[in-house]
Amino acid sequence: DGGITQSPKYLFRKEGQNVTLSCEQNLNHDAMYWYRQDPGQGLRLIYYSQIVNDFQKGDIAEGYSVSREKKESFPLTVTSAQKNPTAFYLCASTAQRVYNEQFFGPGTRLTVL
Amino acid sequence: EDQVTQSPEALRLQEGESSSLNCSYTVSGLRGLFWYRQDPGKGPEFLFTLYSAGEEKEKERLKATLTKKESFLHITAPKPEDSATYLCAVQAGSARQLTFGSGTQLTVLP
């Protein structure tokens, strides 16, 4: 089965800690994306990557970092610099075509204790 | 700046009561408009892509339409299992990323 997996499903972080969220896809998609979703709000773009070893900041990149060492993997690190990290985090991917239908993983819910 | 506005924010329907959700957009050079369904605590599920004004797409009880300023998601004779948040997103110009609206939370009562 082709798809996108995210782990863990739930994550708890103490203040001052860095945490890393995993995103893996076996769809052979070139581009991958990280979004943040807060209650009652739409998805806001954190980072995206169109090719291995390259990525760009989205609208709310401050306090986050990413890497893209493999085509299949796009991990997101939430650093201690992110002041309000409690949210639902979604990873997506798309084939590198003209039109950008994105397919999403199941999400990770991060809570700061 | 690209903007996407969805209305209403929330909609409650009786089973079988047809209605429409609205997605209005302001972009430079629309390339695609996307509809997603999102169940609580899950990732969005892709429904439709519309590329040009006048285009329509259907899937079961859902039909999406597109004009130059807005898109409608028509729900015919909805069932309780259609309850979800419906998200609209646009891709414009040379951008690879999507701009999302804040969604419409649909509740269908039995």
Image (spheres, rainbow, N blue to C red):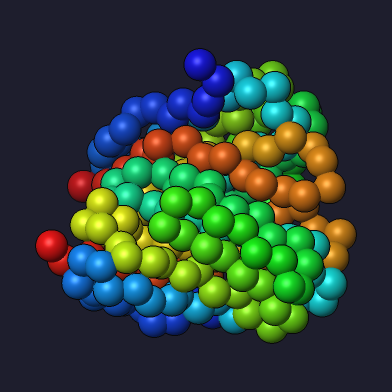
Q: Residue at x 51, y 40 (%)?
A: A104
State whether residue B43 is above or below residue A69: below
Residue located farthest toward the top when viewing the structure as drawn: A1
Q: Quarter holding the C terminus of chain B?
A: bottom left
Asked whether residue A19 appears in the rendered view, the answer is: yes
Query: Where is residue B78, by image quadrant?
Result: bottom left
Figure quadrant of the N terminus of chain B: bottom right
Left-right relation of B29 to A72 = right
Residue drawn at 75 percent across, 31 percent down: A30
Give whichever of B58, A80 is nearer the camera. B58
Location of residue A36 in the rendering, given as x and y in whole percent from the top left corner: 47, 54
Question: In this orientation, which residue lies closer to the viewer: B12 or A40?
Answer: B12
**Nearer to the camera, A57 or A14:** A57
Residue B110 lies, with reference to residue A19, above or below; the image says below
Does A74 sit left or right of A1 as displayed?
A: right
Q: Position of residue B38 (x, y in %)?
A: 39, 52
Q: Is B85 above or below relative to A80?
A: below
Q: Position of residue B94 (x, y in %)?
A: 86, 59
Can residue A69 be seen in this snapshot?
A: no
- Residue sitting farthest toward the left: B110
What residue sits 44% from the left and 51% below the top?
B60
Q: Quadrant of residue B64?
A: bottom right
- Quadrant for residue A44, please give it: bottom right
Give coordinates of residue A81: x percent, y percent. Answer: 47, 52
Q: How many marks?
A: 0
B91 with respect to A107 (left or right)? right
Q: Residue at x 74, y 35 (%)?
A: A95
A75 is higher (above) or lower (below) than B58: above
